[in-house]
């Protein structure tokens, strides 16, 4: 293997949102990776820093070309530079879209359990959310009757699709996404699609970009992409919004400017360009490591704690753990692990309806750290059973 995915790098005391949670803890929470980035990216950062002047930078054609070329090559889609809007992250990009295309008090529908900050986005914009809970039987799936019933409410103006789905690791198929877009079309609901994890799709599935499925989808879907999850560069604060509809694009652009979330820093362009143009080989090796870790987690729970159920993870480096056979109180159980074995997970309660008795675990780390975390989980289950 050409790149380093085995060295344990101590992130404690480095202002890490994920790791600065207490002495001796293992944190498997925030969706970034514990692997060093591709050296090609580091080299580009050092080259830029060596210049010595860190003034206001603009994003040049090389930046937009790198984005377009990556998505054409990896996802086989038609993507025009003119459709892209830069934003400092997907979260502020979603806020800008909600503000630009809906009104205060409007309803926004989303599948649950889902990424917790979607609720925050909606609340920050003074809109209201409608939770369309996914059904579960071996895997999660869409209840289209429930979805149509909720979309038929004339106050629902927008729907958020998360694809691949965080925290479930679900990759929605072409047929599933097409059904969703047809229902949105039927009820005149704008679809916004968070596809930040799309590159991290394992070989069993193929990710389909929502806007590419029909003329209606192209003109009524707002898509969010970024290199940050793929290449572990979330701190670069860079993302893009795909908006083929010119009218929508200009409305969103105005809100991004108003919110001051459209201005890149001096590293945003170089880091993104280096990642997309030079990071492909590193990324290929990363996916092999993540696949090994995914299988390790699956085998560990099947062997050591068989009453724990795992959702099939077809994308992302996030495992959705069902411990409802042990406890249906997500917060209580996760707090117990934190207090007794110094293991921090995301409680399922953060993710809305359907999160009871569940937790999210980030397995984008070295095998050494992953093994330690899973052994702590096992010990925590044993202690919990004794106490309860």
Image (cartoon, rainbow, N blue to C red):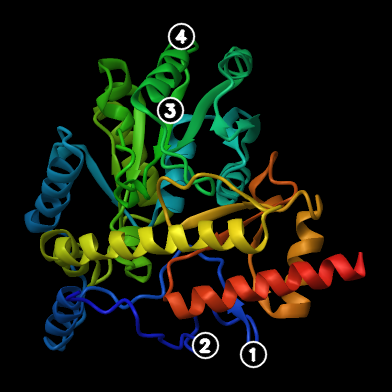
The relative height of residue 231 versus residue 358 in the rendered view (above or below) is below
Circle 4 packing at 10 Å, graded few (<14), some (14-19), many (20+), is few
Q: Residue 42, how many percent across, how many down? A: 20, 79
The quadrant in which the N terminus is found is bottom left
Question: Which residue does the numbered mark 1 point to in the structure image?
Answer: 23
Q: Position of residue 159 (x, y in %)?
A: 50, 29
Disc 4, SS: helix
| Residue that mark 4 sits on | 186
Dot 1 falls on a residue whose secondary structure is loop
Q: Who is closer to the viewer here, 110 or 64?
A: 110
Sequence-wise first label, 3 or 4 = 4
* Tag 3–tag 4 contact (CB < 8 Å): no
Q: Determine whether label 3 and label 1 are within 8 Å by CB.
A: no
Q: Which residue is mark 3?
A: 191
- Lateral position of residue 45 relative to residue 358, left or right: left
Q: Earlier in the sequence, mark 2 or mark 1?
A: 2
Q: Residues within 10 Å of mark 1 (few under 14, many from 20)?
A: few
Q: Which numbered disc, 3 or 2, marks the residue closer to the eye?
A: 2
Mark 1 or 4, closer to the camera: 1
């Amino acid at each position: 293997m050409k790149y380093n995915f085995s060295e344990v790098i101590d992130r404690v005391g480095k202002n890490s949102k994920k790791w600065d949670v207490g002495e001796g803890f293992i944190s498997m929470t925030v969706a970034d990776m514990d692997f060093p980035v591709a050296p090609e990216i580091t080299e580009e950062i050092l080259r830029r820093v060596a210049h010595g002047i860190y003034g206001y930078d603009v994003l040049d054609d090389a930046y937009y070309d790198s984005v377009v070329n990556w998505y054409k090559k990896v996802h086989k889609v038609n993507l025009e530079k003119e459709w892209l809007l830069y934003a400092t992250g997907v979260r502020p990009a979603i806020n800008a879209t909600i503000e630009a295309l809906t009104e205060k008090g409007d309803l926004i529908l989303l599948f649950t359990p889902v990424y917790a900050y979607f609720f925050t986005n909606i609340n920050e914009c003074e809109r209201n959310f409608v939770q369309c809970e996914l059904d579960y039987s071996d895997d999660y799936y869409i209840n289209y009757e429930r979805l149509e019933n909720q979309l038929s409410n004339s106050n629902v103006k927008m729907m958020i699709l998360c694809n691949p789905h965080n925290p479930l690791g679900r990759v929605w198929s072409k047929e599933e996404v097409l059904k969703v877009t047809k229902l949105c079309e039927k009820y005149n609901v704008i679809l916004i699609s968070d596809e930040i994890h799309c590159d991290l799709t394992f070989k069993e599935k193929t990710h389909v970009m929502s806007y590419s499925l029909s003329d209606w989808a192209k003109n009524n879907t707002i898509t969010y992409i970024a290199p940050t999850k793929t290449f572990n560069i979330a701190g670069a604060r860079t993302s893009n919004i795909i908006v083929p509809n010119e009218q929508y694009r200009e409305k969103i652009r105005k809100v991004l400017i108003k919110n001051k979330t459209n201005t890149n820093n001096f590293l945003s362009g170089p880091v993104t360009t280096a990642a997309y143009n030079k990071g492909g080989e590193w990324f290929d090796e990363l996916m092999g490591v993540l696949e090994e870790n995914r299988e390790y987690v699956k085998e560990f729970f099947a062997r050591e704690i068989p009453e724990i159920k795992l959702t099939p993870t077809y994308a992302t480096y996030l495992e959705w753990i069902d411990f409802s056979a042990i406890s249906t109180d997500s917060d209580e159980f996760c707090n117990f692990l934190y207090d007794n074995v110094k293991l921090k997970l995301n409680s399922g309660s953060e993710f809305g309806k359907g999160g009871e008795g569940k937790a999210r675990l980030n397995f984008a780390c070295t095998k050494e750290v992953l093994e330690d975390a899973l052994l702590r989980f096992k010990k925590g289950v044993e202690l919990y059973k004794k106490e309860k």
